[in-house]
Image: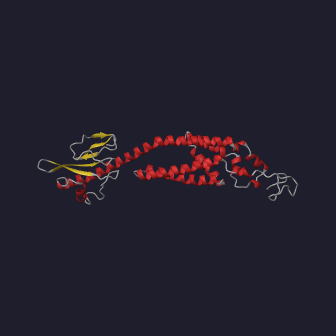
Amino acid sequence: MICPQCRASILAGSRFCSDCGAAVRKPPGDLMARPWPVTLLAAINFVAAGVCLVAVGLYLTLSDGSPAAHWVIAFALAWAGLSAPCGYGLLRLRPWARTLQLVKAWLALIAFPLGTLLSILILVYLLPRPSKVLFSGRRVEELTPEEIGLLQQPTVGAMALVIVGVGGAVAALFTVVIAAIAIPNLLSAIDRGKQKRTMADIRSVAAGVEAYAVDHDHYPLVCDFDELVPVLRPVYLRDMPRTDGWEQPLRYDCLKDEDEWIVGYGIHSAGKDGRFEFDGLEEYAGGATRDFDCDILFLDGEFYQYPDGLL
């Protein structure tokens, strides 16, 4: 301990200073105990890390590998990498954890509006001197009387803690609302990307079929995708896609005239549900579709049935 009068060191358990004789009152031992808002902040950090890791798992499972998905994954991993150790450090009242939480709060100010509000509340709680003393890493006996007085102020007690608690509840509600809006849009964007990939792969296969027809004056004499592969590869297609964006097999059909000559072809995907709408090609109505489960059909050099807005 430190003598409040002459600032001399006092042996543990002493009631008087050996230098000046001043009486020494031992400060309450629970002054350096972890307040519940710090525990709340730690819990928020752990939840944030968990949400980020779940988001990474969803992107890795459902993403089409676009650059935007890579950026989202990198950001989520970075935020989880900051949040998890920050939560642990806050539980242990480590000085570096306060610094890390302040850095996160400054960064989150751009997440207007609720992220900005929560960050301001965290800054209001952690920036003042009482919080700095709380996270100083020192024992109660090593604190000065002024620092002990700071810890006994109400700002470190209920008033500031309630502010952080309300901010945490608002942030949790905001997260739920954003997730309810963003997740369906995310899944829709992922399926949209799979549609684009499917159409690009179908075009690639069709280009190989048309190149074969130019060289042989007729379309490939096959009516099955497995039979088509050795006909086109490797002369007309080096890497021949065999599945659509949902990893379902593509289908190849041929059109025959009355004399059983092959006069046309169709390449199509069953869509998201993996079930073809019809067994033949004549039944398809054609045109633009709005459902991810609808088939995508390429017929004789052009898309006959296709997702709306992607042709």
**Is 183 above or below relative to 234?**
above
Q: In which quarter of the image is the C terminus?
A: top left
Residue 162 drawn at (x, y percent): 64, 41
Q: Quadrant of the N terminus?
A: bottom right
Residue 22 drawn at (x, y percent): 87, 53
Identify the residue at the far left of this view.
259
| Residue 189 shows in the view | yes
Residue 112 drawn at (x, y percent): 55, 40
Q: How many labels does the image show?
A: 0
Residue at (62% x, 42% y) in the render: 165
Residue at (85% x, 52% y) in the render: 23
Q: Which colour scheme is used?
A: secondary structure
| Residue 75 shows in the view | no
Residue at (12% x, 47% y) in the render: 258
**Snapshot quadrant of residue 310:** top left
Residue 144 drawn at (x, y percent): 78, 51
**Snapshot quadrant of residue 153:** top right
Q: Is residue 131 left or right of residue 245?
A: right
**Is 8 above or below relative to 289?**
below
